[in-house]
Image (spheres, rainbow, N blue to C red):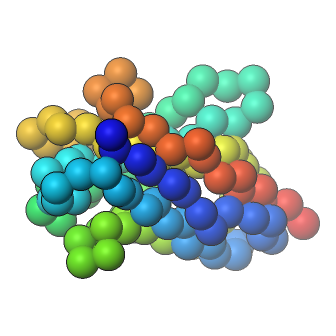
Amino acid sequence: QLQLVESGGGLVQPGGSLRLSCAVSGFTTLDSYVIGWFRQAPGKEREGVSCIARRGGSTTYVDSVKGRFTTSRVTANNTVHLQMNSLKPEDTAVYYCAAARIPFCAPVPRTTAFRSWGRGTQVTVSS
């Protein structure tokens, strides 16, 4: 069974940076999975943030984070990272990573396409 564990969340001031990590286990190769990052703010629906295709291919980002967030994967240690720069208060949310055996990333990842999820890590952007 696929397991995902997020880490790296915390409290940061506006304009600061955080690097989230998603450790994936219980599979044959990370390259078989598309990995998505999602977030959910209080009172809001979970939304797609970023996606990285299989075999470290293309990445997609929701418009609100383009130019600020970068997703990458390190297959050797089964980890996917989300580097978040120039953070804003509206980025405050619980961030989740998820995995799917789908052929490619949608322009904005959809929660319904992903079946395996981590438990999330809190990111708070506040002065």
Q: Nearer the viewer, residue 67 or 34?
A: 34
Residue depicted at x 78% and y 69%? 12
The residue depicted at 67 percent of the width and 25 percent of the height is 44
- From the top left corner, tell me how far across and down residue 53 is, in percent: 19, 53
State the residue at coordinates (70%, 75%).
16
Residue at 40% over, 28% down: 111
Vertical arrangement, residue 13 with respect to residue 32, above or below? below
The quarter of the picture where the N terminus appears is top left
- Against 84, residue 92 (above or below) is above
User: Residue 49 in the image: x percent, y percent?
Assistant: 45, 46
Judged left or right of residue 96, residue 73 is left
Q: Quadrant of the C terminus?
A: bottom right
Q: Quadrant of residue 78?
A: bottom left
Classify residue 30 by image quadrant.
bottom left
Task: Give the x, y percent position of residue 29.
Answer: 17, 59
| Nearest to the observer: residue 63 or residue 43 | 43
Q: Is residue 6 left or right of residue 122?
A: left
Front position in the image: 63 or 70:
70
The image shows residue 43 at horizontal and vertical percentages of: 75, 24
Q: Is residue 6 left or right of residue 80?
A: right
Q: Is residue 78 visible?
A: yes
On the question of residue 57 being in view, the answer is: no
Residue 46 sits in which quadrant? top right
